[in-house]
Amino acid sequence: MSMKYITPAETFKKYLPKDYVELVDYGPFGKSQEEAGPGNMGQFKELLEEHPMCSGCWMAYFIRVIFAALPNPEETVTLGTAGCGRLAISQAAVPFIYGNYGDQNAMASGLTRAFRLRFPEKHKDVITIAGDGGTMDIGFSMTMHSWIRGEKFTTIMLDNEVYGNTGGQESGMSPQGAVLKMAPEGKKFGKMPATDLAKAAGCVYIVRLSPTNIKKAAQIIRRAIFVAREVGPTFIHAYTSCNIEYSIPTEEVFKDAKEKEKGRFSFDEYMTDAAREVIERVEAEEKAARKARKEAMKAGAM
């Protein structure tokens, strides 16, 4: 994808679906976060507006935030696998590759390398977005090896602590003692230490969070992507509750996410020195750009 690729010729606009034309004209492509970022969701044509996920699904909310936070959606490809998340990810106006049972990080490794060879002058962001089963259970070996090899892309784990898409089996990320449809006596062992494993495998930027603060979550997503472009693998471990399998009433989903922030999803951010340098440089550049835009707007109003 690129701006040239998605922008239709004026002659053909009237023949194209209205949603497509509005996405190009009023969507986030080529715009700043002030114009079309998570803080303004609902005020621009979003990349993800419809999905078939359950009412009140916290995972669907976070996926929406992910797409709103992308630095360059027109130069981004997402990859996923079997699981609830792909039901929404595949509906977004960003190229999506559906992996086969946990191989999303293996595919992302090849895709990232191909992009760097084919488009050496561009940043083509590759992001895997999958559940706890696809990332840490079924896809564990491919996830770990992509990190060990230092592949430059971002891995986002949507951790709902259960196999929600296939009936309620326990996963490696389910907490010890969790009673689920297919774990009626409670899970017998503890939750896998995902962020510790990521650090041991060489991830250069790692965050664990319960995404209750939109702006903070967006900042984390952007940091992970910017660092992956230059330094190495980055990992976001996000709590995205399954209100169906854990019987969380829709009106209590946000409260549950806030509660998890106080416990096993307390905010934790790790970065190497090289990652910190990238973050500080990029955020300084963005701050300067925001200031310049404000000054230009002020000058234009005079």
Image (tube, rainbow, N blue to C red):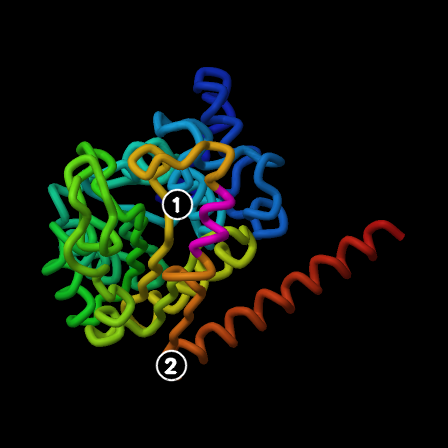
> N-terminal of the two: label 2 or label 1?
1
Q: Secondary structure at mark 1?
A: loop
Q: CA distance from mark 2 to mark 1?
A: 29 Å
Identified by mark 2, the residue type is: Ala
* Residue 2: image tag: 1
Main SS category, magenta section: helix
Residue 161 at x, y percent in the picture = 27, 48
Q: Is residue 42 left or right of residue 127?
A: right
State which region is magenta: 254-260
Q: Tell me what residue is drawn at x 29 percent, y 36 percent.
A: 245
Quadrant of the image containing the N terminus: top left
Viewer-side residue, 146 vs 247: 247
Which residue in the rendered view is the most extreme toward the right?
302
The answer to whether the residues at label 2 and label 1 have Cβ atoms under 8 Å apart is no
Residue 6 at x, y percent in the picture = 41, 36
- The quadrant in which residue 189 appears is bottom left
Viewer-side residue, 74 vs 49: 49
Residue 212 at x, y percent in the picture = 51, 51
Identified by mark 1, the residue type is: Ser
Viewer-side residue, 26 vs 130: 130
Q: Secondary structure at mark 2?
A: helix
Q: Tell me what residue is drawn at x 44 percent, y 33 percent.
A: 249
Q: Which residue is mark 2?
A: 274
Q: Tell me what residue is drawn at x 33 percent, y 66 percent.
A: 228
Q: Is residue 36 left or right of residue 209?
A: right
Q: Tell me what residue is drawn at x 23 percent, y 58 percent.
A: 112
Q: Is residue 250 left or right of residue 90?
A: right
Residue 64 at x, y percent in the picture = 45, 41
Q: Rate crowding at label 2 as few (under 14), some (14 to 19) or many (20 or more) other CA atoms within 10 Å.
A: some
